[in-house]
Image (cartoon, rainbow, N blue to C red):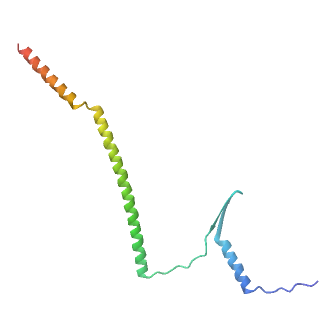
Amino acid sequence: MAAKAREPLSIESLLQKQKEEREAASKVSLCHGSTVCLSIDIGEPTQPKFLSKEERAKLAIEKRTQELREQREKDQLQRADRDAFERQAAELRSRERDIRAPSSSFRRMHTSYHSYARHVTDIFACS
């Protein structure tokens, strides 16, 4: 029975094995049943990057500028929606006013008839 002599692992093979383990650990697989499978690569963990005061200030200004731009766009959309809503409301009010209110010529005729009728009744009442 000749036993195989065990060779020590080389540094390259150890590093390769560690790299494969890290890659396997960085991938998340979500499987539902046997038909749908989603694989996400999380990637290597990154070291925190320390920024200088000027870099932090610059990033803060860029972030604030972006927030202001988004807020302005949101305000414009809301203003456009409100204007459209107010135009629709004004159109509805004018339509309702036209439907409910008699025309001005009808009003003049109606008023003149009543004043004439009052005048005639006053004449006959006096006689």
Q: Percent x, y for residue 63? A: 42, 70
Question: Image height check: is 97 above or below 29?
Answer: above
**Along the viewing direction, whichever of 41 and 48 lies nearer the viewer:** 41
**Along the viewing direction, whichever of 24 and 114 lies nearer the viewer:** 114
- Residue for point 41% across, 77% down: 58
Q: Is residue 121 left or right of residue 42?
A: left
Question: Image height check: is 85 above or below 14?
Answer: above
Question: Which residue is farthest top?
Answer: 127
Q: How many marks?
A: 0
Question: Which residue is farthest front?
Answer: 105
Question: Image height check: is 15 above or below 117?
Answer: below
Q: Quadrant of residue 90?
A: top left
- Residue for point 77% across, 85% down: 9
- Residue for point 55% across, 79% down: 47
Q: Is residue 16 left or right of residue 40?
A: right
Q: Percent x, y for residue 1? A: 94, 83
Q: Quadrant of residue 126?
A: top left
- Screen quadrant of the C terminus: top left
- Residue for point 20% across, 29% down: 107
Question: Image height check: is 116 above or below 104?
Answer: above
Q: Is residue 89 left or right of residue 34?
A: left
Q: Percent x, y for residue 80? A: 36, 53
Q: Is residue 21 left or right of residue 2?
A: left
Question: Which residue is farthest right?
Answer: 1
Q: Percent x, y for residue 109? A: 18, 26
